[in-house]
Image: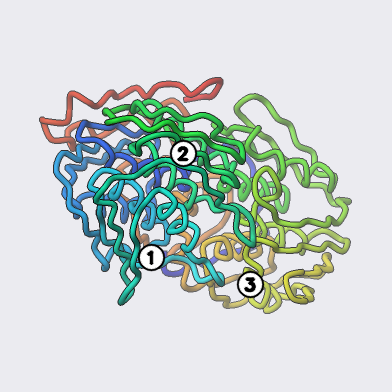
Amino acid sequence: MEKLIVHGGAPLKGRINISGSKNSSLPILAATLLTKDTCTIRRVPDLSDTNYMVRILGELGAEVERASGVVVVKAEKIKSVAPYDLVRKMRASICVLGPLTGRLKKCTVSLPGGCVIGDRPVDLHLKGLEALGAQITVEGGDIFVNAKKGFKGGPMNLMGKHGSTVLGTDNVMMAAVLAKGTTIIEGAAAEPEVEDLANFLIKMGAKIEGAGTNRITIEGVKELHGAEHTVIPDRIEAGTFLVAGAMLGDGVTLKRVMPEHMKAVTDAMIKCGFPIEITKDSITVRPNPNAKGFDLTTLCYPGFPTDMQAQMCALACVINDTSTITETIFPQRFMHCAEMKRMGANIDLQGATARIRGGSVMKGAPVMASDLRASAALVLAGLVAEGKTEINRLYHIDRGYEHLDDKLAALGAQLEPSSSACRTSKVRWALLPVDQRDRELSYSRFTPSLQRHFSPTPPHYPGHVL
């Protein structure tokens, strides 16, 4: 979407299905480059970022088919150069670095693009690959990696000044699975998305222990084979809708979630006083006019996620109390605050800490989105503001939220979207029953050579609704 007009004040009520995780899908799709065999990935969200990754795989020579959340990849013959015109649009495109070098022993990848939220270097990615024996040169905006003698496992530490690196851990893990010997990653990212990637690699034949902790051990193997995998639910999308339900809800239920991945968010909201009911695969939230302010600091998982910081700023604006949020991961990630102040928010920004005095009447205004999560936060602010809020440059939101306008409309929000940047699916997923969404698939869109790898009924992940 380029622009979204939000008419504030409409209460939200009902159930929605949470999509597959963007931050799992991207490295998992990249990991299909590690084998010549066919891989089938299910519950891939319909986003501009996943579309870019599918295009990158195709440009690299892989045969790729996609329909209604299922992506089938056969990377029998691939190239070693990732195209600049696609890579520059998405930061996560850097995660092809590990699998390309791991399989081909060399690659050229342009420095990536993505959200503009301050310093987001890739130095830890390169440090990890160098520890495996790669020779790396950065010149003219391109990263040249050469590992002609192959990778050799060894110890390394990927902890950076702002914590561990998620994509860096992904990259090194994908490179190390085909290395000789044992690789030990200290300071590894412990995020659920890293563990999800590891589980897919294990299905492909990799030997990995410790994923989901800060110490990952990888025993290299000679080759990997094809596999099928279902992506975990998106905990940030779920958290965003949880905040929406707390701000202006009348009972909002999120289905197909993994509550254990959202504990930092639900704990913070329960501490504020919001009524939250949790089952093994759903979360229900209701507003509380007497909710208390909060003090949050963003941290690496299992701490409070930086990707929920902007949304919590929006929530703090409607709590009749004072809240503070300190950003330790991306200290410059407060560009949404200036736009919220245009709507009447009382926010005092000092360095990496925002102090929000809630309870002010928010009023609709023209605002501009600066990045993915800021976009979501401005939509949330528009939902509670008086009158009409016009959010411009909202194309960011198509990078990380699958059909956000449809899902909010299904809950009762009054929206006027301008245009959609990425709608590959024929089905309006948000309005379908939970079990129907994954079964109404466009089987005919797969080429005959790949149809035999496609199953209309995806496998369960433990304890969760299909």
Asked which quadrant contains residue 151, the reply is top left
Q: CA distance from mark 3 to mark 2?
A: 34 Å
Q: Say what amino acid the circle numbered 2 marks.
A: Thr
- The residue positioned 77% from the left and 76% from the top of the image is 350
- The residue positioned 45% from the left and 21% from the top of the image is 460
Residue position marked by numbered label 1 in the rendering: 112
Q: Secondary structure at mark 2?
A: strand
Image label count: 3
Q: Say what amino acid the circle numbered 1 marks.
A: Pro
Q: Which mark is residue 332?
A: 3
Q: Earlier in the sequence, mark 1 or mark 2?
A: 1
- The residue positioned 44% from the left and 65% from the top of the image is 114
Q: Please tell me whether mark 3 or mark 2 is closer to you in this view.
A: 2
Answer whether labels 1 and 3 touch (C-beta < 8 Å): no
Q: Count neighbours of disc 3 (C-alpha within 10 A) and say few if under 14, some if 14 to 19, many if 20 or more.
A: some
* For residue 268, above or below residue 127: above
Q: Position of residue 189 (x, y in %)?
A: 57, 46
Front residue of this view, candidates 50 and 291: 50
